[in-house]
């Protein structure tokens, strides 16, 4: 009697999102729209936007007005639309906002008023689909994912040689994790 080969099923499930976790009706409608565009057009732009619409909040980091303006200042980008699958936030360190054409999932009130005051324009993704079904004259951007405070604690444990991880300390002061391993006068300095 020949035994059958036992198939290894540990790699069966592909871990990637095929739809958003959110039940938000408007997000789901955008997904329907971009699913259609990703299928029916040959533009990679639509495929990328669709994939980003599925993402979690952590993977859709916000982008500040100043970073947005900085990115749009680069050569060959004037008159183009900045596309961000995420939130655009205000930056009060920036005094003068240039005229911007942006498309985003969400724009905070402060950022919205400043963009419109500067004579800019804010559109939604459904409006973008009508204007640029293939992403013509668009610059796709995303905020930095490693700017979260939590990311600072990642990596090798704090105190291990070659580690830059931030320790989880209740408070920052003289009495908190400042002696052994932190100063060469106290045993050693890592």
Image (tube, rainbow, N blue to C red):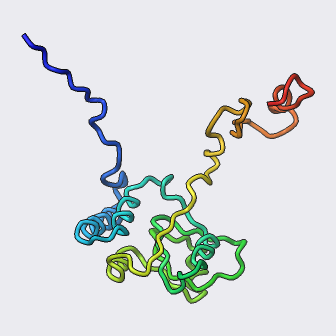
Determine the residue positioned at 62% across, 71% down. 90
Residue 11 in the image: state x and y as whole percent. 30, 34
Determine the residue positioned at 27% across, 64% down. 35
Q: Looking at the rendering, in which quadrant would you find the C terminus? A: top right
Determine the residue positioned at 35% across, 63% down. 50
The correct choice, above or below, for 90 with respect to 132 in the image is above
Which one is nearer the viewer's eye here, 81 or 108? 81
Q: Could you tell whether 170 is left or right of 131 in the image?
A: right
Q: Quadrant of residue 189?
A: top right
Q: Quadrant of residue 156?
A: top right
Residue 176 in the image: state x and y as whole percent. 81, 33
Determine the residue positioned at 38% across, 63% down. 48
Which one is nearer the viewer's eye here, 73 or 173? 73
Q: Looking at the rendering, in which quadrant would you find the N terminus? A: top left
Residue 17 in the image: state x and y as whole percent. 34, 50
Q: Could you tell whether 138 is left or right of 10 in the image?
A: right
């Amino acid at each position: 009697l020949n035994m059958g080969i036992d198939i290894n099923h540990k790699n069966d499930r592909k871990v990637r999102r095929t739809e958003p976790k959110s039940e938000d009706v408007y997000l789901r409608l955008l997904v329907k729209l971009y699913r259609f565009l990703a299928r029916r057009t040959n533009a990679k732009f639509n495929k990328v936007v669709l994939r980003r619409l599925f993402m979690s909040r952590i993977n859709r980091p916000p982008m500040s007005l100043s970073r947005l303006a900085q990115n749009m200042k680069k050569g060959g980008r004037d008159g183009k639309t900045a596309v961000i699958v995420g939130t655009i936030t205000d930056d009060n360190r920036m005094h003068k906002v240039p005229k911007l054409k942006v498309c985003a999932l969400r724009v905070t009130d402060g950022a919205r008023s400043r963009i419109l005051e500067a004579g800019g324009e804010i559109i939604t993704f459904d409006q973008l689909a009508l204007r640029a079904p293939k992403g013509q004259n668009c610059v796709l951007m995303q905020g930095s994912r490693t700017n979260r405070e939590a990311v600072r604690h990642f990596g090798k444990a704090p105190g291990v040689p070659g580690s830059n991880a931030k320790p989880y300390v209740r408070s920052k002061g003289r009495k908190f994790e400042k002696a052994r391993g932190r100063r060469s006068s106290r045993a050693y300095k890592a």
